Every structure is written in C-alpha cells, then in structure tokens.
Image (cartoon, rainbow, N blue to C red):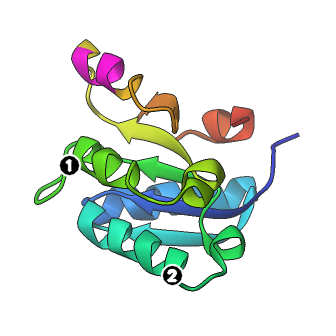
C-alpha cells in the first residue's frame, strides 16, 4: 500500500510534464493537495511565504518533486535557496529529484543535499509513486 502525504509539490518548467505527473499522483491517491509550479523561483518564494504564515507545519509540502534543468533558477539553485529556509521547512519537506538528466554528475551532486531523498528519471510511473517511502 502506498504511503500517504498531506501535500505534494511539483516543480517543473514543462507544463505537460507537470500535468502528466499530477495525473499520475492523483491516480495513485497518495495526497489530498498538489501544488504545481512552473519555475523554481516562484516555488521558493511560495515556500518562504508559507513559512511566514506561522502555519508552516500544516501548509508546507511533505514531498517536493523537483526538476533539474529549468530556466532562471535550476533545481540545484533551488536546493541552495531551500537550504536557507527554517529548520521546520527542512524537516518537513523531502525532495525527490525528478529529471530527464542521465548525467551521473547530477546524481552525485544531488546527494550533497540532505533533503534530497530520491533521484528518479522522468516520467513518474505509477510503480515509482506507489513505492515512494520517504
């Protein structure tokens, strides 16, 4: 049985990938709420604003699916900004790198971030969602 998460966030500049991944997550019924962002910059601003509400524990996502290759701010720049968030945010949000990159350097680089719990290749599959246990 799949683990349940209160809230999930998708960050990918490709709207079609976001839509497909959202539908896969909905079909797997692992969450009630899905936040979708087409840019890492808007996603980090969203997280910062959620922290300021005083309800971070309730509103921050449990899992963030993060693309690497995006314009303006890529996935690794997002991770650098994420590191500056509060301990509450860092404890609550677990990050899954969801990418089409097959570059071993990206995989190794992702391991340097404590909050990155998993590295998956696109697209999300029903099987990978059901096995998700982070």
User: Pointer 2: what residue?
Assistant: 52
Query: Which residue lies at the image location 33% right of the left edge and 62% below the top edge?
Result: 16
Examine the structure image and report whether residue 57 is included in the region drawn in magenta.
Answer: no
Residue 123 visible to the viewer: no
Answer yes or no: is residue 17 visible: yes
Helix, strand or loop at label 2? It is: helix
Question: How many numbered marks have been drawn onto this rendered protein structure?
Answer: 2
Residue identifier under label 1: 74
Q: Residue at x 42, y 38 (%)?
A: 97
Which stretch did the figure color magenta? 105-109
Image quadrant of residue 49?
A: bottom left
> x and y percent of residue 61 in the render?
60, 63
Placement of 38 over or under 46, stated as above or below: above
Q: Earlier in the sequence, mark 2 or mark 1?
A: 2
- From the top left corner, tell me how far across and down residue 21 is, in percent: 49, 55
Look at the magenta stretch and give its main secondary structure.
Answer: helix
Residue 45: percent from the left, percent from the top? 34, 74
Circle 1 sits in a helix, a strand or a loop, which is it?
A: loop
The quadrant the N terminus occupies is: top right
Please provide percent x and percent y for residue 80: 29, 46
Residue 121: quarter of image: top left
| Outermost residue to the right | 1
For marks 2 and 1, give the one nearer the viewer.
Answer: 2
Residue 48, quarter of picture: bottom left
Question: Camera-side residue: 121 or 118?
Answer: 118
In this rendering, the answer to whether 37 lies above or below 108 is below
Decide: is 100 above or below 84. above
Mark 2 closeness class: few <14, some 14–19, many ≥20 residues within 10 Å: few
Question: Which quadrant would the C terminus be assigned to in this image?
Answer: top right
Task: Identify the residue at horizontal 51%, vertical 62% (top origin).
Answer: 9
């Amino acid at each position: 049985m799949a683990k349940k998460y209160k809230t999930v966030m998708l960050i990918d500049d490709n709207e079609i990938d976001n839509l497909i991944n959202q539908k896969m997550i909905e079909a797997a019924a692992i969450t009630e709420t899905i936040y979708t962002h087409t840019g890492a910059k808007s996603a980090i601003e969203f997280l910062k604003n959620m922290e300021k509400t005083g309800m971070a524990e309730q509103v921050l996502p449990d899992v963030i699916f993060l693309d690497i290759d995006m314009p303006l701010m890529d996935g690794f720049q997002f991770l650098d900004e994420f590191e500056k968030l509060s301990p509450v945010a860092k404890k609550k949000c677990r990050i899954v790198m969801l990418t089409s990159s097959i570059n071993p350097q990206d995989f190794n680089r992702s391991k340097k971030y404590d909050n990155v719990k998993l590295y998956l290749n696109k697209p999300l599959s029903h099987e990978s969602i059901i096995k998700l246990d982070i």
